[in-house]
Amino acid sequence: MIDVFISFSTRGGTDLEWIVSLGKNLKSSYKSMYGKNELEIWDMSKNGPGENFVDEISKALKETLLLIVVMDPSFNNNVQVLDEIDKYQQARTVAGEPVLIIKIIKNRGDKDAELRAVVDSNLLVSYFSTIKSNNIEEQYKEGSTEYNDEVGKIVKEIRKHKVEQRRKINSQKLLNRLAELNDIPKIYVAFGDSNLTDNRLKFINELNGTIINNKNDKIREVKVIPDDFTIQFDYEALGELLCEENPYREKCLDAMLNNCRVVILPFESDKIAEAENYLKRIKYQLKDIWVKALDLKKELPVHILLNIPEVLYKTDEFKNELNNPAYAGYKNIKLVKNQIITSFIESFVEDLRKIVDRPEPGPEIPGPAPAIADLTPEIPGDIPEDSPINIYIIEYNNAPRPDISEEELNEEEINRADLWAYIASHKFTLIPRLDPDADFSFSEAKQYQNDSLSRSDAIIIYRGIRENDQWCKKQQAETYKAILELKRETQKKDILRAVYIYPKQKKRERGLYSWCNYNVIIDYPTELDAFLWNLRKH
């Protein structure tokens, strides 16, 4: 596929030499910025003697990702350029692809408005000239800071769409390959590097070798993913797809994890800085893995293989993922603290025998998330209710902001009532909340909270649309401080806690809740069930 087609008028001020130089500079800048010589550019210089220009241009435009239109005052609605724009737009529309046009105005003269109106550019409009204070236009010289800055902006735009296109193609390859392996038991090995590092390669090779040479027929059938997919594209492209924000990532991760028997998180280095970087790179994978591990039906086993100092997991950014007490409640998650690959694999294969003998979980069928009041927790067996379990819901709500409509406030009131009704319907005792309209002093309100906490087995922090982030952080800190004081004074066990975020609340950063054992977000209603289930277990 051609990345960029440069269209220009051959009449007047824009000559082929300037276009060819622009193409060379785009390629050079791309390689300098991204370390790869992979930018494919087509311009009129590609046509050799005796070739059919019209046919070659039409063919190139059908294969082009992004069109650059170069114009100057001599453009005068050039028929050739308008025809190229039209053919490009038609080809992209027929293929169901977005039309991506960058407009370069080499110099404008007195025709700036006319040149801008030639084509509706949905990307950049890049000027390669400036108007001086004496109203004289000066064109940027090739190699000047101004020229290079414009080239850099264009390269960044090209790169963005080139990566997007690659993600789209590779996601389909990945999903097609997963469909082929749908009935084969698999192990997912999370990765956070764009390359196949020596440590990871050694681990994968030894794991594959042990599986292939095992006497158990079922174990020999197991495939290790995603290394199978390097046949179709490299790890850098896989990293773009799974380790970065994009619309295809979640579907691919879900497809891999939904049909997977076990997940392994092998840390590729025992250096703090590299381990932190690894965790950042796998944050999207961790999110999906965590949700699947909490699923009481699937019970996806997770093995974390590391040799990292414990101090790493005391940091707020990471302890929610790997030093989270929630993991202690699940027998299917193992933390292996010694990175001795052979010993781990030997032990792992013993566990794998039990795993492959279990029926493979069926694929999940996507559908709309149920309303909170309609949820039915999938809890295996009857749970004895020897004593009441008290839940205290703390609401950090300021006075309503002026930008919140009465309709929105009413919707939130309904949602809050649904949450309370849902929890109460499952025979949990809810400690009455403080009446916000009552005339309580600060000391009385604080005492009420302390008394409520002392009677609580769990708390849920309700975050709604009317709160202020800084004020909310302060209130959370006060709540946590009160819990710690209770533990010191009465030897009370740690209170299980969750954060419930109103679905229409835009800010959902989990970092704000790093002290919470469990994070409950309405996007994942099974997390609320998992939280309530753990209350019963405790």
Image (cartoon, helix red, strand yellow):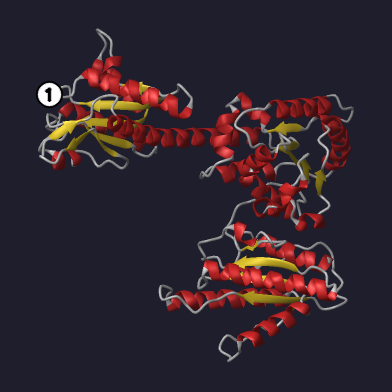
Looking at the picture, tell me which residue is in the foreground, 310 or 417: 310
Percent coordinates x, y for residue 86 in the rendering = 25, 33
**Left or right of 3 in this view: 469:** right
Residue extending farthest to the bottom is: 439
Mark 1 lies on a secondary structure that is loop
Q: Label 1 belongs to which residue?
A: 12
Say if 65 sits above or below 422 in the image. above
Q: Residue at x 69, y 63 (%)?
A: 516
Which residue reaches farthest front? 133
In-front residue for pair 259/437: 437
Q: Is residue 447 above or below residue 30?
A: below
Q: In the rendered view, does 270 fall on the left or right side of 134? A: right
Report if residue 430 is visible in the image. no
For label 1, the crowd category at 10 Å Cα-Cα, with few meaning under 14, some 14 to 19 and many 20 or more, is few
Residue 350: image location, x then y, percent: 89, 37
Comparing 494 with 332, the one in front is 494
Q: Residue at x 83, y 65 (%)?
A: 537
